[in-house]
Image (cartoon, helix red, strand yellow):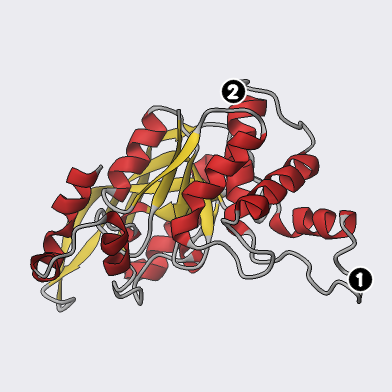
Amino acid sequence: MIKKLLVGLLSFSATLACGITTVKEIENEIHKVDMSNAVSSDDMIEYDPNNYGYNDILNYYRNLYGEENIYNLEFVSDVFYNVSNFNQNDMNLAYNLEYDLYSPDTKDPIDNTCALIAVTEIVDYYSNILGEFKSDSDENELYMKVVNACLKAGCTSRQDGTEKGEIADCISAGFKRFGSKRRGDSNWYYLLDNIKDAVRWRSALQMSLSDHSVVVRGLLKYKLTYNKPFLNGTARLKTTETVTFVHISEGWGYDYGALIPADRIYNRSSGHQVTWAKK
């Protein structure tokens, strides 16, 4: 992992020459990356399983390149595995009611918990779906125990969310709560490679967007024929390309999850990271 991190830091070569050597210092440099064009929740497309999301994907490219520049969109392949997609608002409501956190005397309800929803979906996947170990089958009970384990471990907060660098510790705390030996392991580089590996191995992989935390649950591919812009958009050339979308559990309770265009996820540091639940 260290080798990959150092290879990925070629763009930080001047900084490395000044003595950056530890993973923590590397992560600090990552956080300095310009996030203005980073993939965010605004890039998510709600997935419609009818014709593998054909209409929504076609509209996405029509809006991106102009309807007159789109010739054809053809389905290629879909890989999907059953990671649950929980509803953050519903689960926070259940937690806050259970612990009476809406009381005027408390004024400390949990909020900004997208990372904890992702952790709960990952714990649920390996326990209730794959059957590796036992946990609560009730999603609200499971969520409460994961949240409490993460709060106890000090890797999250009630209202200020979870730092990207703490998500691995939260995954570790969630699995430890149920006696599993799986532990969180984050990677800040080779993001698309990690996503493809996760899909190949049917692993539930946490991914941080610029403003949200999600879980990878598959890949969808189409063949797109369109007028591709080049020369800074001053010219176009008719081109056919295979385009890829990452299928995610977005944590808002969409019936069939959401899609993110893979070309919006840079295969290098972009201030994001992915986190495995490794044995």
**Mark 1 or mark 2: which comes first in sequence?**
1
From the top left corner, tell me how far across and down residue 115 is, in percent.
Answer: 57, 55
Badge 1 marks a residue whose secondary structure is loop
State whether residue 201 is above or below residue 229.
above
- Residue drawn at x 83%, y 74% is 107
Quarter of the rendering containing residue 18: bottom left
Residue pointed to by mark 1: 103
Residue 204 in sight here = yes
The amino acid beneath tag 2 is: Leu
Q: Is residue 54 visible in this depiction of the protein?
A: no
Residue kind at label 1, given as amino acid type: Ser
Crowd class of label 2 (few under 14; some 14 to 19; many from 20; radius 10 Å) = few
In the image, what residue occupies the spot 66% across and 56% down? 252
Which residue position is annotated with label 2? 130
Q: Nearer the viewer, residue 200 or 274?
A: 274
Q: Position of residue 106 (x, y in %)?
A: 86, 71
What residue sits 27% from the left and 68% below the top?
29
Q: Label 1 to label 2, Cα distance in Å?
A: 38 Å
Residue 19 occupies quadrant: bottom left
Q: Residue at x 52, y 31 (%)?
A: 81
Question: Regarding mark 2 in the picture, which secondary structure is present there?
Answer: loop
Q: Quadrant of the C terminus?
A: top left
The reply, left or right, for residue 241 in relation to residue 46 is: left
Vertical placement of residue 103 versus 264, above or below:
below
Looking at the rendered image, the quarter that the N terminus falls into is top left
- Residue 138 image position (x, y, % from top left): 79, 36
